[in-house]
Image: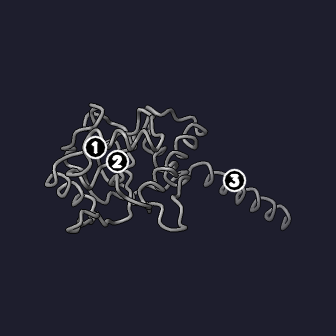
Amino acid sequence: MKLLRIVWSIVILTLGLVAFYLLWPRTLELPQIGTVNEWPFTEVNGKEVSQQDKPKLVTFFFTNCPDVCPMTFIELQELQGVMQEKGIADDEYIIVAVTLDPEFDTEERIRQYAENMGILNPNWLFLRGTEEETKQFTQSFHFTYTKNAEGFVTHSTSMYIVDPQDRIRSQHTMAVGTRRVNIEEIADQLEQFIK
């Protein structure tokens, strides 16, 4: 009788663990840490941003950046491959890059920059607005930057996942020094919002 109770206890415990494993969500719900109220920018190739109900990775850059921006873009190109391995096509998500120096970064200069970086995928959107639009937009993300008298920009080193409803859901670090971009985590989070 005692042996039968032990066997039944093991069976019930095993079934409970299996049910827990099968019913537990595979990913944790990301919190809402902000909202993008509008996309006031011009995409340098004429694409629309605000109409796209797709998840977005939003990053900030300036074309004269000597290190963080280009290294981040090089690493983000790996994201395309990781997403493809997950069976996710380029047209299911967007990478948005907003210039922090619209005075210097003309549309032509940004297009040339993207070409020089080898960024040709149609789901990369390079945005440019006025100085005031850029300042207001970065405030939604609590992203800080300054431009000194010589025209050099210093900025925060964060990127953000924005869901299809334009809610900011997570923050990631750009490539800084020897620290790499966490491509796998970004890919996993973008995947959560792909319908």
Q: Secondary structure at mark 1?
A: strand
As rendered, which of 6 and 2 lies closer to the eye? 6
What residue is pinned by disc 2? Answer: 97
What residue is pinned by disc 3? Answer: 15
Residue flagged by tag 1: what amino acid is it?
Answer: Leu
Q: Is residue 175 above or below residue 95?
A: below
Task: Residue 124: give x, y in percent of width and height.
Answer: 40, 39
Separation of marks 3 and 2 at Cα, in angstroms? 48 Å
As rendered, which of 67 and 161 lies closer to the eye? 67
Q: Residues within 10 Å of mark 2 (few under 14, many from 20)?
A: many
Q: Give the residue drawn at x 25%, y 53%.
A: 35
Tags 1 and 2 in contact by the CB under 8 Å rule? yes
Return the disc, 1 or 3, that comes first in the chain's sequence: 3
Residue flagged by tag 2: what amino acid is it?
Answer: Ala
Q: Give the residue drawn at x 35%, y 45%.
A: 96
Q: For the residues carrying marks 1 and 3, which lies nearer the camera in this image?
A: 1
Return the disc, 3 or 2, that comes first in the chain's sequence: 3
Q: Is residue 177 above or below residue 77?
A: below
Q: Give the residue drawn at x 22%, y 50%.
A: 102
Task: Residue 59: give x, y in percent of width and height.
Answer: 36, 53
Task: Residue 77: give x, y in percent of width and height.
Answer: 51, 45
Q: Residues within 10 Å of mark 1 (few under 14, many from 20)?
A: many
Tags 1 and 3 in contact by the CB under 8 Å rule? no
Quadrant in the picture for the N terminus: bottom right
Separation of marks 1 and 3 at Cα, in angstroms? 53 Å
Please identify the quarter of the rendering in which residue 153 is found: bottom left
Please identify the quarter of the rendering in which residue 115 is found: top left
As rendered, which of 16 and 168 lies closer to the eye? 168
Task: Residue 50: give x, y in percent of width and height.
Answer: 25, 38
Separation of marks 1 and 2 at Cα, in angstroms? 6 Å
What residue is pinned by disc 1? Answer: 127
